[in-house]
Amino acid sequence: MKIGCPTEIKPQEFRVGMTPDAVREAVAHGHEVIIQAGAGNGAGFQDEDYRAAGATLLGTAEEIFAAADMIVKVKEPQAGERKMLREGQLLFTYLHLAPDPEQTKDLMESGCTAIAYETVTDAHGGLPLLAPMSEVAGRLAPQVGAWTLQKANGGRGVLMGGVPGVAPAKVVVIGGGVVGTHAAKIAAGMGADVTVLDRSLSRLKYLDDVFGGTFKNQYSTAGATAELVREADMVIGAVLIPGAAAPKLVSRAQLSEMKPGAALVDVAIDQGGCFETSRATTHADPIYEVDGIMHYCVANMPGAVARTSTQALGNATLPFLLNLADKGWKQACEDDPHLLNGLNVHAGQLTYYAVGKALGIDVISPALALKS
Ligand SMILES: NC(=O)c1ccc[n+]([C@@H]2O[C@H](COP(=O)([O-])OP(=O)(O)OC[C@H]3O[C@@H](n4cnc5c(N)ncnc54)[C@H](O)[C@@H]3O)[C@@H](O)[C@H]2O)c1
């Protein structure tokens, strides 16, 4: 198969769909890989790295889209890229179609087959191509929160680990899923005094069994949250209710009870945020203050560490990418129902129920698409 990987063109996106290592593996499987010149620059991969791995480099996205059987990307195709997709071409990338009727319409009109990273599943009920970015955002949260806490940035001037004779920062993590667990691990590793709140008893049991000696956990109620938030130097928002906007768990009124200069890091901002005063920010201007409390609400946190994020995403996508290339999408999806769950669009029709429901578009079952 001819696999094409163009440069990402969405603003502030520095990741790339394939690492040189992924190229090397695909080439070893007998595939041809074409990479747009400069595509890896933002993630620290040079054109020579790709050439050495066996890729052919082409100058423009037009050439990549025209030549490739499968396009591998990170972000959803932008309007200009969508015009270049064609019937029968396979697209493997994040799509997030439910809130995006224009993209959905364009993908359907292109006649391409689109498999979305975010809806591929695994045997444990997880989302294996979404999890790596949650791991990155979770591990980054205490790092950016610690920076926000510094005096020059408007913060309280508290050091995460304290020093001998001085208490460490108190960190509260709301939501103990993928983001929350990784955030708590890193915050505890920095020496902070960490408590994780979650509403899932099974999750709390897991956290207690595995991390009981590293950080505390508590059942999430409005009362427990209010009490912990009052005492906190940093609160990390990491809740998710699948398919719904994030619940608002800290109100504006509560800010006045918090320690002045405390930091709120709302990782759940991509779902609307879990603090009433959260609004999405960018890496260029990540923090702002409300009622004396510093907020960090960047919606694409993994972009700050594009190299690590590219490698983490690449590790997760590679086995699926190789299967798609080796077998063709139909056989690969027939053999793996979890990959089939990633199918969102095929030959002008929508194949993902939740997207159809959100956008009021008729859907055919993925199994039917396989037979077409
Ligand atoms: N800003 C970014 O760059 C970025 C990057 C990755 C993920 N995210 C977002 O981070 C959020 C968390 O993602 P995740 O992968 O950890 O999800 P997850 O499903 O693994 O974990 C969410 C946790 O929240 C818990 N929860 C739900 N309601 C709660 C409540 N009221 N109180 C306490 N806990 C509650 C759930 O029980 C679950 O354990 C999502 O909104 C995700 O989209 C943002």
Image: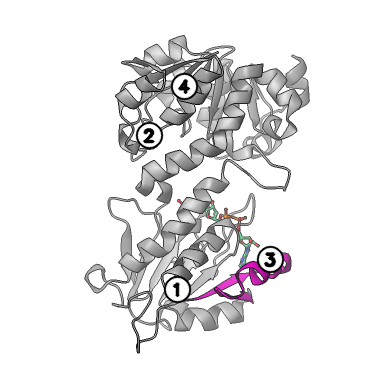
Q: What residue did someone put label 4 on? A: 82
Mark 4–mark 1 distance (CA, rounded to whole Å): 41 Å
Amino acid at circle 1: Arg
Number of the front mark, 2 or 3: 3
Q: Residue furthest left?
A: 152
Q: What residue did someone put label 1 on? A: 252
Label 1 crowd (10 A; few <14 / some 14-19 / many >=20): few
Q: Does residue 253 appear left or right of residue 295 in this picture?
A: right
Mark 4–mark 3 distance (CA, rounded to whole Å): 43 Å
Q: Does residue 364 appear left or right of residue 66 in this picture?
A: right
Labels 2 & 1 near each other (Cβ < 8 A): no
Number of the front mark, 4 or 1: 4
Decide which of tag 2 and tag 4 comes sooner along the chain: 2
Amino acid at circle 3: Tyr
* Residue at x 41%, y 45% (from the top left corner): 308
Decide which of tag 3 and tag 1 comes sooner along the chain: 3
* Residue at x 58%, y 63% (from the top left corner): 247
In the depicted view, which residue is nearer to us: 249 or 153? 153
Screen quadrant of the N terminus: top right
Q: What residue did someone put label 3 on? A: 206
Screen quadrant of the C terminus: top right
Decide which of tag 4 and tag 1 comes sooner along the chain: 4
Task: Please indicate, yes or no, whether residue 72 appears anywhere in the rendered image.
Answer: no
**x%, y% of residue 176?**
59, 64
Q: What residue did someone put label 2 on? A: 10
In the depicted view, which residue is nearer to us: 231 or 305? 305
Decide which of tag 4 and tag 3 comes sooner along the chain: 4
Image vertical order of residue 15 relative to residue 106, above or below: below
Quadrant of residue 143 within the rendered picture: bottom left
